[in-house]
Image (cartoon, rainbow, N blue to C red):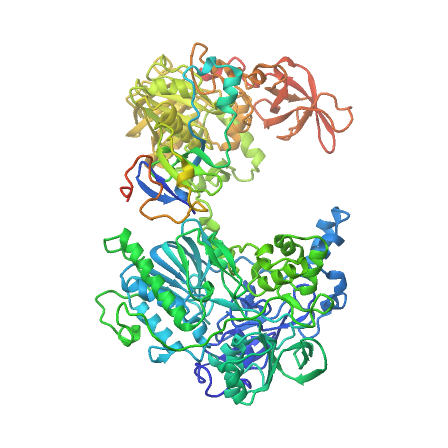
Amino acid sequence: MTKQPFRIPGAGRLTPAKTARFTFDGKHFSGLAGDTLASALLANGVHLTGRSFKYHRPRGILSAGAEEPNALVTIERDSARKTPNVRATVQDLYDGLVASSQNRWPSLSFDVGAVNNIASPMFSAGFYYKTFMWPKSAWAKLYEPKIRAAAGLGVSPDQPDPDHYGSRYAHCEVLVIGGGVAGLAAALAAAESGVRVILADEQSEFGGALRYESGARIDGQSGWDWAQATAARLAAMPNVRLLPRTTAFGYYAQNFVGLVERVTEHLARPDKSLPRERLWQVRAGRVVIAAGAIERHMVFADNDRPGIMLASAARSYLNHHGVAVGRNVGVYTANDSAYHAAIDLKKAGVAIAAIVDLRDNPSGPVVEEARSLGIEVNHGRAVVKVGGTLRVSSMTIEAKGGGARRTVPVDALLMSAGWTPSVHMFSQSRGKVAFDEASHRFLPGTYAQDCISVGACNGTDGLEATLAEGFEAGKEAARAANGVNTKSPPPLTPPRKGEGGTSVSDPPSPLRGGVRDGGIAGRSPSVDSSESWSGGMLGSGPGAGAETTVKAFVDFQNDVTAKDIRQAVREGMRSIEHVKRFTTNGMATDQGKTSNMHGLAIAAETLGKPIPAVGLTTFRAPYTPVTFGSIVGHASGPLFDPTRRTPIHPWSERQGAVFEDVGQWKRAWYYPRAGEDMHAAVNRECVTVRKSAGLFDASTLGKIEVVGPDAAKFMELLYTNPWEKLDPGRCRYGIMLREDGFIYDDGVVGRLASDRFHVTTTTGGAARVMNMMEDYLQTEFPHLNVWLTSISEQWAVIAVQGPNSRKIIEPLIEGIDISDDAFPHMSVREGKICGVPTRLFRMSFTGDRGFEVNVPADYGEAVWEALWEEGRKHGACAYGTEAMHVLRAEKGYIIVGQDTDGTVTPADASVDWAIGKKKKDFVGIRGLQRPDLVASGRKQLVGLKTKDAKLVLEEGAQIVADPKQAIPMKMIGHVTSSYWSENCGRSIALALVVDGKSRMGETIYIPMPDRTIEAEITGMVFYDPKGDRLNG
Amino acid sequence: MLLIRCPYCEEERPELEFRHAGEAHVVRSGELASISDEDFEKFFFIRSNPKGVVFERWRHIHGCARFFNAARSTITDRFYLTYKAGEPKPEVDFSAIDTGPAAWANREPAEPNVAAGAEPGKSD
C-alpha cells in the first residue's frame, strides 16, 4: 500500500484496510473505498488538479460536492470510455480508476497556455466579443477553432459511446429532492402515512451536511448515524424508493422532475447488463425541495490558488474521509461555520495558523471554543494576499481599514463567506425568489407549483428547525395526497432484478434498518445538539475592491474576477442578465452555484443600487451536467427510429437487392445480377418489364379503408373526383387537395362495394392522409356515417406489370374472370390467389398492362414466390423502386412530393381532368379559385428533352430562358424528375416551368457549374403516347 | 411536460400523447365554394394569435385518436379546460380562474383541467 500521508488515523468513517488504487496523470496513488477522487488525492497531498478555462491558472479542489468549479478531470475506463469534466469531488473512487487533468500542455505544473495569465489584461470581460469581430469569415476558419482549442474544458471522446443508458417513468405522491436532514425527515414523515415516496440525493450516501457536522446529535445518536438509520428504515418500506447518486437536474411543468441516476460510475468492473446512467422522469403530487445550501468563497486577491478551499469541504474531508487538507491551515471567514472546521482540524492534530475573521467583534461559543483550543483569532481583519502559485504557501493579513501587514505561512487556507440557499430547483419550477434583507439571501418567495422548500434551501438555520420543518412538510404532503387518494396507492414500479426491494411481509431486519430505535411512527425525531451557520458577507473583500487590479475570482470555472464584473457595469451593462452574459459569470455547467451572489453584490455595488433592485439571474436546467446518453436512453442506433420492412423484404434480400430508405421503410431499389452496376440493372429491369413483365413490391403503399353508408359522400368531400357514380368493382385515380387548392396526395381508389372504398396513398403520405381524413370526419363532417381504418400493413401488394402480366397471374387466380372484357383497366375484384384472399386491382403505374395483387401480409412472401415461379416461365424480372420511377416517368405519371412541392395545383400538373366539375364542395374547391392560382405565370409541369440525348439532367437543377443574361439569372423553373430511359433510348425529364404548357417546343437552358445544357420543352409522355399498351 | 386532459378518455395524459392541430372554432362554410376572397382569407389564413387565452384544437393521437378543443393561456401554457369537438366555445371569464403565475400553478390536484360546466371533483 502506498502511504497516504494526509490520512489521519482514527479520523473519518472509512475502513483503512479497504484500499483502492488509482492513477492521476499517470502517477500511481492509493485511496480507500468510500473516498471520492478528490478526497483520495487530498489524502496523498495533491491539491493541484487542473488549469483554468481562460487564463490557464493552476487550480485545486475547492469543494466537496457538486458545486466544484475547479477540479474537473477526465476519467478514462478504456479508449471509448473517456468522460471529460468529471468533478473529482463527486466521482467515487474505485480500484483501478484512471484520471487525468485537463486544459494543460505539456504538463499540469508547466503549462504553456498559462501565458494567457500574463497577457490577461487582454482577456478581460467581453474580450472575445470585441476582438474577433472582423472579418466575419475568419470566425469559422480561424478564430473559433483556435479559441476552442486553447480554451474549453476537457476533450470530447472520439469514439461511439459503448455504454447503454436506462430510462424509467415514475409516479409518486411525494418526491423529496435532497437527502440531508430536512429531506430525510420529510421522506420519513411522508412514508409513514403509506403514500408513495421517492427520495433522491446526489451523493452516494444519504445524510447531506451531517457528513461533516460533528456537533449534530439526533435521537441520541450522532447526526450521521441517525441519517444512516433513517435511510435504512426508509429502504425497508415498500412504498419508498431511495435513489442515491441521483441528481434532480430539471424541474418542469406540473411537477414533472428529471432525475439522473449514476448506476455504474462508482464501480470498478460494472456489470455490462447495467446501464451506465438511468434517467428518471418523475411526476409527483408534491415536491419537497431539500436541496440545502452552498458555502461561498471569499473574494480576495489570488483566491484561486490550489490549497485554498471552502471550510465545509475541509471539514467533510476530515470528518468523513479522515483526510487533513494540510498540516498548517489558515482560515479566512465572515461567519461562524468556518470556526467549526478550524476546531475539528485542531482537535485532529492539525495546526491552525490563524483564523482571520472579517467581522469586527465575532463572539459566541464557537469563537470561545476556538480561542480556548489556543487558536489565534484575528477579528476585523482580512486576507489581502497569498503566496505560492501551484500551492498556497502563505497568507498576508491586514486590518480591514488598511495598516500593517503580516504574512503567515500556511499550506492550506479555508474560507467561508457564508451560505447561499440552493434555490436552483425552486427557481426552475418558476417560483419567484425574494430577497431577505435581514440575512442578505434570496429565499423562495412566490411558489408556482405544488412544491415546498425546506431546510437550508429555505433559509432555515439550525438543525432543530430544519428537522422540524422537513418532518412537517413531509407529513403535510402525505396528508394532502391522502385527501385526493383515499384508496391505498398503487405500488411503485416494482424493483427489477438486482435492484433490491422488499415486500410488506418481510419481517423487520436490522440489515434493512427496520428495527432501529427512533422509529415511533409519526413522531418527529428530536435534536439533541446542533450548530448554526447563519451570517456572512457578499461581494469582494478588502484588497479586492473597485480601486484594485488584483485577480479576485468570483466565478472560478468561467475565470471571472471582481474586476470583470465592475468593467461590465462600466461598459454599460445594467441588467444582471447582461452582466452575466458579458462576463460569463455563473454561466454554463456551473449555474452560479458559488458565484452568483458575489457577482450580483459586486454589480449592485458598482451600479449603486440595492441587491434586490438588480435582481438574480435565472437558474437553468440542468442543475449539474447531464450526459447526452442519459437523455437519449435506448433511442440510439437501430432503436433511434423504427425500421419498416415489407413481407417480401426477405425474398428481396436473398436476391441480393440493394435497398433504399424511404421514410422509415427499406425498399428494394434494384436487383443487380452478377457483374451489373446500378445503371445496368435498372436498364435491364425497365426493358424487361416492357418486353415481358416485372414483379414489384408495392407493399409500402399507404392503404385506408373508407367504410359506411356515407362512404361515397365522404370521398366526394375529401377528393376532387366524383365518386357517387363510380360502380363497385371499378377504380379511379384520386387527387386530394388541401383547403388552399394545392395537391396533397394522390392514389388509386377502388370501390369494393357501394359502402366500401379501398384507398391507396403515397408511401410517405399514408399517415398524414389518414390524419387529414380523421380530422375532417371528426370535426367538419361528423354527420357522415363513415369509419376509417388504416390497412397499410394488413395487405402486401405485388405489382405484376408488363405485356405478360395476365399470363403470370392467370394460373394462380381463383374465382375472378380476368379477361379484358370482364376485368378492364381500372377495375378491382375480390377473390383468391394461391388459395388465399386477394383484392386484385387491374391498374398500371408503368403504362403497360398491369395488376396489383393485394394479399394478407402474412401470405405476401409466399404469393410473391408463386408469382415469381410463374414469371420466370415468361422471362419476367423483379424490379425495384428506381425502375418503377423510370417507367412511370416515361409515361409522365407524377409522384406527389417529387414532381409537386405543396405549391402545385391539379392544373399545374395537368391532372385537372380528375376534378369533378359539377361538384359543389370538396376540400380545396375554394382554394382553387384564388386569384393567384388561376393567374398566368404559374409554374407548370412539362417534359424536357435534352438536345444531347445522352445527357441526363440533375434533379433540382434550375432552368433559365436566356443563358447569356447577367448573374443573378432569372430562374423560370427547375427539374423535378430526370432519368436515363433505355426504352426511349435517351434521357427524359420532368420539370416545373413558368407557363410551361404554352412553351411547347421552346428551348430552355440549364446552367451547370461546368457547362450550360440545352433542352426542349415537350409533353410529359415520352413512351406510348396513345396508351395502347395498357391493354397490350 | 404538460398534462392534458382528454375529454373523451376523461383523464389527464402526458403531452407526448397529443398533437396540436391549430386554432379552434374556425368555421368551414357549408357554401365554401361561393364565399368571397375576403371571407376565404379570414377562413384559411387569418389566425388570432392572442397573448392570453387561445382556443385551439388538439388530437389525442397516441391515445383515443380523437380531436378535441382546449382553452390555453399562451402566456403561461396553462390549460384552462378541454372539451369535445363540436361543443360550443365556452363563455368563461378566464381572468377569474387565472390565479397562479404559470400553467402548472398551485391548484387542487382534484381539479385538473375541469371541463366546462362539469362538477368539480368529478373529474377524478
Q: Quick check: A877 above or below A159? A: above
Q: Position of residue A776 (x, y in %)?
A: 39, 25
Whole-percent x and y of residue B11? 31, 42
Q: Where is residue A817? Give x, y as percent.
A: 32, 18
Tell me: residue A977, above or below residue A175: above
In the picture, measured across the screen, residue A420 lies left or right of residue A232, that is right
Which quarter of the figure has residue A767? top left
Judging depth in this view, the residue of A405 and A55 nearest the camera is: A405
Estimate the x, y position of residue A592 in percent, counting from the top left: 57, 61
Q: Is residue A873 visible?
A: no
Judged left or right of residue A821, residue A266 is: right
Given residues A210 and A1007, the one toward you in this image is: A210
Asked if A813 appears above or below A912 in the picture, the reply is: below
Work out whether residue A357 can be spotted.
yes
Image quarter of residue A608: bottom right
Q: Quadrant of residue B27?
A: top left
Q: From the viewer's side, name the closer residue of A659 and A415.
A: A415
Residue under the image location 41 percent in, 40 percent down: B79
Numbered circles on residues, count: 0
Q: Is residue A254 above or below residue A770?
A: below
Q: Left of A219 or right of it: where is A955? A: right
Farthest residue toward the top? A918
Q: Quadrant of the C terminus of chain A?
A: top left
